[in-house]
Image (cartoon, helix red, strand yellow):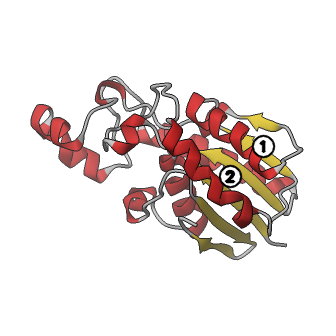
Amino acid sequence: MMIRFLLIRHAATDASTDNLLLGSTDAEAHSSGMAQLNRLPGILEEYSPSLWFCSPMLRALQTAEQLRTLCGIKQVFQVDARLREIDFGQWEQKSFAEIEKNDPDLIPAWSRYDDFVFPGGEAVAGFTGRVAEVLDELRADGSREIGIVTHGGVIRTMICLALGLSPRNYLLFSVLPSSLTVIDLYPEGGVLSALNV
């Protein structure tokens, strides 16, 4: 049996438009980012998720509430803390240029990814583990279509895990704010059916 995941990245924030790392900082979505959600009702009408989940971060909750209004979603969004973005620690709200300037010795370890711990933040292994846990639980649930409002890093990691790729390949997938990504999971493995719709 195939299970379909409808992964929606939250609406844009000031940090996402400025290309800053935004993980544990509880920033809100800005109005122009929320306006971009207006294109999703026509896209989502061909799907019928029986379950909806959401990250507890403000920007994701705001996105979920707007989607509820726009799409007439009747189900309650189940908030799951494991769907929050990775905690970048001291690198929160910093650009790559700033990180490269201030912590150049950490860049090689970051590029190896799997065993990296963000300074003062979360271990990549812990982040990947919690995302994998959610994916495994939802795969076993038996629902045919599941909607999830979450973050770019979570979606990229889910793509890698579903397709059998190492999570260090997460940057191969660009996931835009207010976009829909669709993963179809079969017993034999996953298929990336849509990206940035």
Residue at 47% across, 37% down: 86
User: Secondary structure under badge 2?
Assistant: helix
Label 2 is placed on what type of residue? Leu
Find residue 151 and name its label. none
Q: In this view, does 57 lie to the left or right of 146?
A: left
Mark 2–mark 1 contact, CB under 8 Å?
no
Residue 105 falls left or right of residue 32: left
Q: Residue 135 carries which label?
A: 2
What is the quadrant of the N terminus in the image? bottom right
* Real-space Cα separation, disc 2 to disc 1, in angstroms: 23 Å
The residue at the point 60 percent across, 71 percent down is 194
79 to 192, vertically: above or below: above
Residue 53 sits in quarter: top right
Judging depth in this view, the residue of 42 and 111 nearest the camera is 42
- Mark closer to the observer (2, 1): 1
Residue 27: x and y, percent? 48, 27
Name the residue at 35% across, 38% down. Answer: 21
Please tell me whether residue 190 is drawn above or below residue 118 in the rendered image: below
Q: In this view, does 89 lie above or below 166?
A: above
Q: Is residue 88 above or below residue 160?
A: above
Residue 57 in picture, x, y percent from top left: 58, 30
Q: Which amino acid does label 1 sit on?
A: Arg
In percent of width and height, residue 44 lies at 74, 62
Residue 68, disc: 1
Please tell me whether mark 1 sits on a helix, a strand or a loop: helix
Task: Name the residue rendered at 14%, 41% in the picture.
Answer: 100
**Where residue 92 sits in the image (x, y, percent)?**
34, 29
In this rendering, the count of numbered labels is 2
Q: Residues within 10 Å of mark 2 (few under 14, many from 20)?
A: some
The answer to whether residue 11 shows anywhere in this view is no
Query: Considering depth in this image, is 179 or 181 the residue closer to the camera?
Result: 179
